[in-house]
Image (cartoon, rainbow, N blue to C red):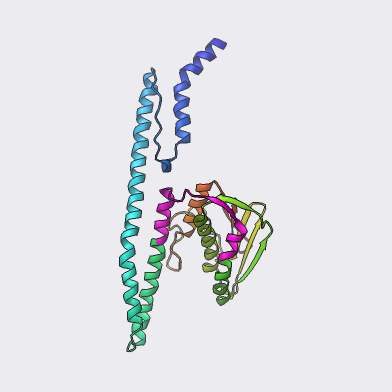
Amino acid sequence: ASITRFIYKKLWKPFYRTLSDIEQFNIRSNEIPVFPKTDTQEFTQLNKVVEILINNSVQAYKTQKEFTENASHEMQTPLAIFQSKLDILLQQQDLTQEQLSIMQSLYDAASRLTRMNKNLLLLAKIDNLQFLETQQLNVSAILNEPLVILAEQAEANKIQIETNIEDTDLTVQANKTLLESLINNLIINAVRHNIPNGKISISLQSYLLTITNTGTDKPLDETIIFHRFGCMNEGTKGSGLGLAIVRQICSLYGWKISYTYQNGRHQFVIFL
């Protein structure tokens, strides 16, 4: 029996080696696994098929990233020119109310396109691993920065913000730009999709960052909320990319994010 087990393990060793390499493969790392040679014809054929699949996937992934990044770069200049020309037109003295209304609508659309373009470029950079530089960051300090700015916007919409920052010494090893982007997107999302006289609750305790807000009276679709443009509709004010950015950053650092809806409150929790 021991001899049989030994032969069995030796025979299937190339298969389990291939399986291990596939499990460790990360399409963003640009490192294509090299499978060891084997005398077993079936395993050799398996490795060739897997290599073809991986190479095709990597090529498609690179093409998609390049398109997103190139398109975002190319859109920056015409968008900036468009907004600049609108700024000049809006300063004209002889405009009718109807003309002002039309131009304001165009200006709002251009601003939204600019935000969308900026977020697409950020996602492309995250995919390209362009934020490798990290440092120890105090989460509560990063968390307090956008609260000062967004407090005015929340107050204008009669939204009450409550904070409960217990873990003031919590630090994480991360890129500062990405951590700021994660927190900003979550808080902006809570403000933007809230209701008049609504509430936002922000807490940080025991490695858990929790942001809860009032809003629509039904839960969001958990299967699409973290997808790019997953929650876009006619009434959406944002770019449809905020939560996708949040998930991408969490994935990069191995943080867990979850969404729940209870008692009329939308809650996002990140386990750092």
Q: How many marks?
A: 0
Q: Residue at x 50, y 59 (%)?
A: 181
Q: Quadrant of residue 97?
A: bottom left
Q: Is residue 231 above or below residue 86?
A: above
**Along the line of sight, which residue is nearer the eye, 212 or 117?**
117
| Image location (x, y in percent) of residue 209 | 61, 56
| Image location (x, y in percent) of residue 136 | 58, 51
Q: Is residue 33 above or below residue 167?
A: above
- For the question of whether residue 221 can be seen, the reply is no
- The extreme right residue here reads 166
Q: Residue at x 39, y 40 (%)?
A: 30
**Along the line of sight, which residue is nearer the eye, 43 or 93?**
93
| Image location (x, y in percent) of residue 48 | 35, 28
Q: Is residue 153 above or below residue 7?
A: below
The magenta span reads 118-145
Q: Main secondary structure of the magenta part?
A: helix
Q: Residue at x 42, y 54 (%)?
A: 123
- For the question of whether residue 167 can be seen, the reply is yes
